[in-house]
């Protein structure tokens, strides 16, 4: 049963702390997306990778957010320093370049106090 | 700039009724229009999708109607069931350059009551 996995599922931290969220895309998928979901803004695309190379991170606040793919089985999203306004659910999704469907993980619910 | 506008924000439908969710887009370069379904505590999952060269697509109780000239598309859920209660997102993909980025509407929370 292939699925996208994300860790941690829940994270509570204090303002100013570093937060790292991890995603394991479905094996064989070559595109990875990071989204942020809030009640006010809905689903926002933060960053997008193909074949581990970042293609678009224009949705990400560059001063505090960074996204990487150290290898094909791991994508990371890091926030340093975190702020209360970063509180949201962060989703990772993966897909195939030749297909349209994006498969979402279960999300990481981040609360910054 | 919100490129995909979705309405209503929330919807309550009686079991067996028809649920209708509408979306409007601005960019005529969008070439793929999926609907995603999200249950509480889960990630969104693809429900049904359409391309602009067809006006309607049906899969079981779910139908997308697409009006290219009006730049609108809608999701119809026939014989709505309590298990359909979820948040539904329309989305649109920008054509070209191998881009697979989706722009999502803000979602519609559907509640189907017995």
Image (cartoon, coloured by chain):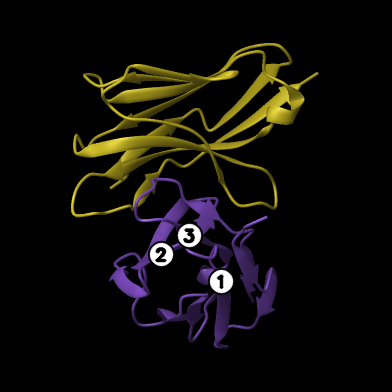
Which residue reaches farthest front? A28
Q: In this picture, is B10 found above or below B92?
A: above
Chain B, chosen colour in render: yellow
Q: Earlier in the sequence, mark 3 or mark 1?
A: 1
Establish whether labels 3 and 1 are both on one chain.
Answer: yes
Q: Work out which quarter of the rendered image holds the C terminus of chain B and state it.
A: top right
Find residue A23 and name its label.
Answer: 1
Chain letter for mark 3: A
Q: Earlier in the sequence, mark 2 or mark 3?
A: 2
Nearer to us: label 1 or label 2: 2
Q: Position of residue A71 (x, y in %)?
A: 46, 81
**C-beta proximity under 8 Å, tags 3 and 1:** yes
Residue at 34% x, 53% y is B101
In the image, B6 versus A33, the foreground residue is: A33
Chain A, chosen colour in render: purple
Determine which residue is flagged by label 3.
Answer: A94
Lateral position of residue A51 relative to residue A42, left or right: left
Q: Earlier in the sequence, mark 1 or mark 2?
A: 1
Determine which residue is flagged by label 2.
Answer: A30
């Amino acid at each position: 049963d292939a699925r996208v996995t994300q860790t941690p599922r829940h994270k509570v931290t204090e303002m100013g702390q570093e937060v790292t969220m991890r995603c394991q895309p479905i094996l064989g998928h070559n595109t990875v997306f990071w989204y942020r979901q809030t009640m006010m803004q809905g689903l926002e695309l933060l960053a997008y990778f193909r074949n581990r190379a970042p293609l678009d991170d224009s949705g990400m606040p560059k001063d505090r957010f960074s996204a990487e793919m150290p290898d094909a089985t791991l994508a990371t999203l890091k926030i340093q320093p975190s702020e209360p306004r970063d509180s949201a659910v962060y989703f990772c999704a993966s897909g195939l370049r030749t297909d349209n469907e994006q498969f979402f993980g279960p999300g990481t619910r981040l609360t910054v106090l | 700039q919100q490129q995909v506008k979705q309405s209503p924000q929330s919807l309550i439908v009686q079991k067996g009724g028809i649920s209708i969710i509408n979306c409007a887009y601005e960019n005529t370069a969008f070439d793929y229009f999926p609907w995603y379904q999200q249950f509480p505590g889960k990630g969104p999952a693809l429900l049904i999708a359409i391309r602009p060269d067809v006006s309607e697509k049906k899969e079981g109780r779910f139908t997308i109607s697409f009006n290219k000239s009006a730049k609108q598309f809608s999701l119809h859920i026939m014989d709505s069931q309590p298990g359909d209660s979820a948040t539904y997102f329309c989305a649109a993909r920008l054509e070209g350059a191998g881009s697979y980025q989706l722009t999502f509407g803000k979602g519609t929370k559907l509640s189907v009551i017995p």
